[in-house]
Image (tube, grey):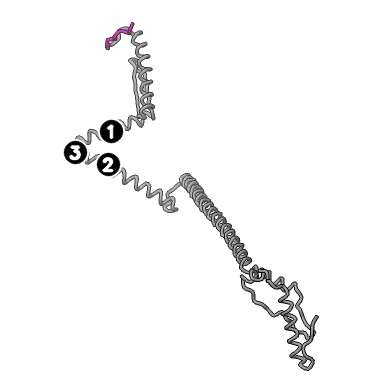
Amino acid sequence: MGRGKIVIRRIDNSTSRQVTFSKRRNGLLKKAKELSILCDAEVGLIIFSSTGRLYDYSSTSMKSVIDRYNKLKEEHHQLLNPASEVKFWQREAANLRQQLQYLQECHRQLMGEELSGLSAKDLQNLETKLEMSLKSVRLKKDQILKDEIDELNQKGNFIHQENIELYKKLDLIGKENVELQRKAYGARDVNEENKSSQPPFTITNGYNLHEPIHLQLSQPEIQAEPHPQNDVPAKAIKLGSELSYSKMHPAKGPRAFV
């Protein structure tokens, strides 16, 4: 069975009235707390019992809630009256001027000016503020310098890696140049080595028959071809020797060489 509908009127029985008050009060306080948490609302609840006992709940503080309520209520009434609205803005301007004057005075004191009217306690508080501010400035400065050092280290590592890559490329190009030079001048080096390994052929009069020969790159291929007459070089050397001897000794005639 569902609960019957309750008539909203004063409960005559004092005991029942007290029990109902206690239950409804706890439920109302619970709903106010849930409303402030779920909806992020600033809630203030004040309850006075029939015996004059106070029960209250506030999400922040009851004084701030009441001050806010009074201020908004006053502003609402002032907006309805033009003369009251002018007075309201005049008061707001005066409050802003007062706050500006206070901030300027604090700034001058932090800069070390107008300290004659301060007591020892005020000067100590000012010194504490300056030390805290100086500590914050130093921490910020150290953080900025650390970030700059880290950035420079990263740039240095990047440049170092680029230098390593450039050295590798330079070494590779040097090896390629050596290989190209070896291929280009390999035939000349081989011919010079063969020439230095064979002793020169001389005759009795001291003349050297092996004149310097300038080889071309195609010269080894011509020399490698087989000659049909293998005795031609020997005959040419023998004939040249006989002619040289006849010129030097015309009376004796040509000399035979074995």
Q: Is residue 109 above or below residue 219?
A: above
Q: Is residue 116 above or below residue 225?
A: above
Can residue 73 be seen by looking at this rendering?
yes
Residue holding disc 2: 91
Q: Residue at x 20, y 34 (%)?
A: 80
| Secondary element at image label 1 | helix
| Secondary element at image label 3 | helix
Task: Please name whichever residue, 7 or 239, is drawn nearer the observer in this view of the structure.
Answer: 239
**Splitting the image into 4 quarters, where does residue 194 fall?**
bottom right
Q: How many marks?
A: 3
Q: Are marks 1 and 2 in contact (CB under 8 Å)?
A: no
**Splitting the image into 4 quarters, where does residue 174 fall?**
bottom right
Quarter in which the C terminus is drawn: bottom right
Q: Check the image and name the residue furthest to the left.
A: 82
Residue holding disc 1: 72
Quarter in which the N terminus is drawn: top left
Left or right: residue 200 compared with residue 221: right
